Image (cartoon, grey):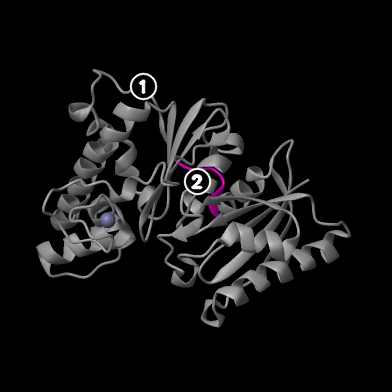
Amino acid sequence: MLWGIDLGGTKIEGAVVDPSDGRILLRRRIATEQEGGYEHIVRRIGLLVAEMERETGRRRPARIGIGTPGAFDPQLRAMKNCNTTCLNGRNLPEDVRAELGVEIEMANDANCFALAEALHGAARGRETVFGVIMGTGVGGGIVVHGRVLQGCHGIAGEWGHNVLHEGGEPCYCGKRGCVEKYLSGPGVERQFHQRTGRRLACAEIAAAAESGDPDARAAIDTLCQDFGRALAVVIDILDPHAIVLGGGVGNIADLYTRGRDAVLPWLFNPRLDAPILRPMLGDSAGVLGAALLAA
Ligand SMILES: [Zn+2]
């Protein structure tokens, strides 16, 4: 059995997974209580694993996978880019290893999403997979031959902070015009508000576009164009065999048709054969992917 932990800003989720088919045999969650600080979060992970032992009647395995926000920098041995900010600068895998007394395999949440969808979801059987979560932010992960590509700096797949529009919207990362400022839910909503003065949630904009609202149609059109241009860069470099789109923005149907078409003018190839897929695993992808890290 594989054990995985998905560490989020509000909840910590644990799962026990059957490695043969990716079936989740046990799933437990507790509150992160991040206001309690870093050491408290590490102890909460310990509590959750102890509870999983009680529930299953089994001892914890020798290795556990953990999905986290942000990334672990293998050079600095420290977390970075976490929106749960007390994690930043800390050696989370080492501290969790000490807390649990087991080996830790860690990757960020987008990597876990990509791994789960590549092994047991929409992109099962594909050699190279680019998985993206287009939600509150934009994160990406790369899976090659069933393994997460972490990279030299631990940022492999971090598509969200590639610059899409030079001199564009300022981003918290310090640059301007990042992919995340245009392809995230808040990005779509901000642009729609700037253009129309109307405040609608991303899903409402997509629904309005479907019912013919011209402003909303223009917003979805812009989204598709930006998506195509940004994704072409990834495909030129990685040339994945499949792309999986998660997150709320990934639900927008036009991305799979017009968004896909918008890749071609920017691509160094006359055709795009790699499928752009909807995810299959829903909200269990994160914790499933974390467990699969331990394989
Ligand atoms: Zn940025």
The quarter of the rendered structure image containing the N terminus is top right
Residue for point 37% across, 29% down: 238
Residue topped by disc 2: 111
What segment is highlighted magenta in the picture?
Answer: 277-283
Observer-nearest residue: 200 or 174?
174
Q: Is residue 151 left or right of residue 125?
A: left
Q: Is residue 4 left or right of residue 115?
A: right
Classify the position of ligand 1 by quadrant: top left, top right, bottom left or bottom right. bottom left
Q: Secondary structure at mark 1?
A: loop
Q: Secondary structure at mark 2?
A: helix
Residue 49 coordinates in the image, percent (x, y) = 74, 64
Residue topped by disc 1: 273
Q: Are marks 1 and 2 in contact (CB under 8 Å)?
A: no
Establish if 68 lies above or below 255: below
The quarter of the rendered structure image containing the C terminus is top right
Q: Amino acid at mark 1?
A: Asp
